[in-house]
Image: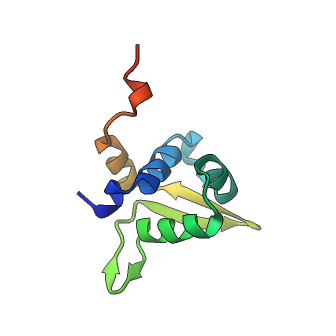
Amino acid sequence: MSALLEDSLSVAILRMLAQAPDDAGVSLPRLGKRLGQGASVLMRRLTLMGDAAIGGVRGPGWVRVVQHDDRWVAHLQAPGRAQVQTLPPLADENRD
């Protein structure tokens, strides 16, 4: 298991991006507001979750962050969707 999947913020980001309609992605301000994190914290985590090489090690390619005009938007990529499918359901998803 990837160390990123052991981190609650990374898992929360994956879950939130998976809920975006029609692969539209989620703006960083919206992501930050929902997760209670600042943009710099999110950008650092999203960088680790992307495909950039950091310290000579390429990331898993789960997300892609693009700039549309003056706003940054995070998108879930196919490898990220596959990871979301492996996550255990949330506690409230198990309720009848």
Which residue sits at x=56%, y=64%?
42
Q: Position of residue 36 (x, y in %)?
A: 61, 52
| Farthest-out residue, bottom | 56
Q: Where 70 falls versus 35 (above or below)?
A: below
Question: With 18 as the anchor, is 81 left or right in this view?
Answer: left
Question: With 9 as the anchor, is 83 left or right in this view?
Answer: left
Question: With 55 as the anchor, is 73 left or right in this view?
Answer: right
Q: Position of residue 48 (x, y in %)?
A: 43, 70
Q: Quadrant of residue 28?
A: bottom right
Q: Where 93 falls versus 43 (above or below)?
A: above
Which residue sits at x=46%, y=55%?
9
Q: Position of residue 39 (x, y in %)?
A: 64, 65
Which residue sits at x=40%, y=34%?
90
Q: Position of residue 58 (x, y in %)?
A: 34, 76
Which residue sits at x=40%, y=13%?
96
Q: Quadrant of residue 7?
A: bottom left
| Farthest-out residue, left | 1
Colour setup of the view: rainbow
